[in-house]
Amino acid sequence: MATGEIEVVANKIEVLGKCKNVLPFEINTDQEVREDLRLEYRFLDLRNEILHNNILLRSKILKTLRDKMDELGFSEIQTPILANSSPEGARDYLVPSRINPGEFYALPQAPQQFKQLLMVSGFNKYYQIAPCFRDEDPRADRAPGEFYQLDFEMSFATQEDVFKVIEEVVPYTFKKFTDWKVDEGPFIRIPYKEAMEKYGIDKPDLRNPLIIEDVTNVFENSDFNAFKGKTIKAIVVKNGAEQGRKFFDKMGEFATSNEVGAKGLAWVKFEKTGEVAGGIAKFITADIKERLETQYNVEKNSAIFFIADEFEKAQKIAGLVRIELGNRLDLIEKKVYKFCFIVDFPMYELSDEGTIDFSHNPFSMPQGGLEALKTKQPLDILAYQYDLVCNGYEMASGAVRNHNPETMVKAFEIAGYSEEDVKNRFGALYNAFQYGTPPHAGAAPGVDRMVMLIANSQNIREIIAFPKNKKARDLLMRAPSVVSKQQLDDVHIELKK
């Protein structure tokens, strides 16, 4: 005490848990500690006040989600972890069977088939905090190997019904744990094609005011060789002409980096005087200048960045440049959560090998049903698929499901699967759909990303008690690890040399 008085006199001290004299790192400190060391000693790292509070916050968020789903009439039903292998967009984790030599379970990428079977079974409103397992490369916003989602499904439901549940549950949960401004429903809806045109990405951060414009027609007669025969995207930055040459050079370095892949980043300034300066100013003719000003509202003191490439590549690069400009110019709106639904995803896409593949969820209902599958070109077919996006992160994904066996077979046939393949790989669903399946729809908000956003953390590992590192290794438990030959023999596995 400040007075120097003693409140407690110890007559005896008993050490209940001994500690080494030297800690591997200081726990409550601002000093940077190598992440792999923190993960190796995660039991100590979790004593850090910020990290400790993140895990307690996660606990409270999970309880809030469960309470809200219960209030809305959903029943929590658990589904199996040892399941079958199915193509759902990522590699499966396989589990060999000791009892059935040469056969494997797969850890579920999502409870997709099980929740649809529950709809057939008459459980009209299902949910669970579901563990999902996907053998994907880790990222700062995606935990490697396993993650959790608020999985829910409803029978006799439309896309609108699903949106109403999300718009009820998500803002309620965010507002309970943050003092930031939270968007109220109904959320903005952006068709996939429009999102790619305006933002260059299907998970746009609406806090960033910059919009991508297609100016290909403006430069159709331009003498600038780099633009000839290319799709040309432009990003107009108000007051951007105030930036010095170094800023434009740094943006060029970013655009041409290996991570972005642009061949170059052209730019010009529209000065306060009305003159066009810098970059490719000599190719901005009076006619081009007038069209940019009138068609795209380019004002004085603005800067324009141009990306020229093949259509899809130009979109992608422009999307990355837009994000970088928003960050470097500090244009991102602060302390706000902005939500939107991305809708009307294409049902199919071309794979790297040039074959038709599902672009989203293979169990989704095509818009136009069986008729669309029979009469339209595959790449023209849209699906009742949707994503919820928050501040540039995909936070939920869902769809109106395909519940008709004939439609299901045709949808998979277009993607290269025979009816026999469907029966073998999705036999339970195929069989169940023969017995009066109700229309149904659902979604699955990601719990990890929700907690990460509410905690205002930039790293998803900071809101998971025992995460894996960037190489998908659990440094605390030392997994994955080598097992004994006897264990391999038990499950009939022989390793390649």
Image (tube, rainbow, N blue to C red):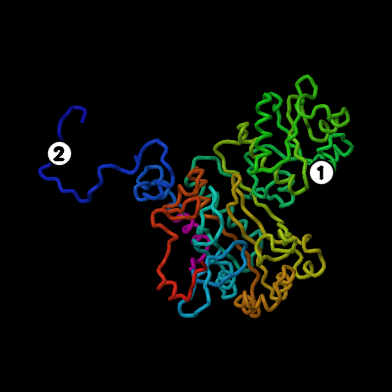
Res 136 → quadrant: bottom right
Q: Is residue 86 left or right of residue 376?
A: left
Q: Is residue 99 left or right of residue 430?
A: left
- Residue 8's tag is 2
- Residue 80's tag is none
Q: Which badge, 2 or 1, is on the more N-terminal residue?
A: 2
In this rendering, the answer to whether 65 lies above or below 75 is above
Query: Mark 2 near mark 1, Cβ–Cβ under 8 Å?
Result: no
| Secondary structure at numbered mark 2 | loop
Q: Nearer the viewer, residue 115 or 10?
A: 10
Mark 2 burial class by Cα count in 10 Å: few <14, some 14-19, many 20+: few
Task: Determine the residue positioned at 70% across, 70% down.
Answer: 412
In this rendering, the answer to whether 163 lies above or below 180 is below
Q: How many numbered discs, if any?
A: 2
Q: Is residue 373 left or right of residue 203?
A: right
Tell me where the magenta segment starts and ends, as one range.
62-78
Residue found at the very far left of the displayed protein: 11
Q: Amino acid at mark 2?
A: Val
Task: Determine the residue positioned at 12% across, 39% down.
Answer: 9
**Disc 2 or disc 1, which is closer to the eye?**
1
Task: Determine the residue positioned at 36% across, 49% down.
Answer: 41
| Secondary structure at numbered mark 1 | loop
**Whole-percent x, y for residue 198 in the image:** 73, 44
Q: Amino acid at mark 1?
A: Lys
**Whole-percent x, y for residue 10 in the image:** 12, 41
**Whole-percent x, y for residue 216 in the image:** 83, 41
Task: Determine the residue positioned at 82% across, 68% down.
Answer: 375
Residue 67 in the magenta stretch? The answer is yes
Q: Which residue is mark 1?
A: 230
**Whole-percent x, y for residue 193 in the image:** 74, 51
Q: Quadrant of the N terminus?
A: top left
Mark 1 burial class by Cα count in 10 Å: few <14, some 14-19, many 20+: some
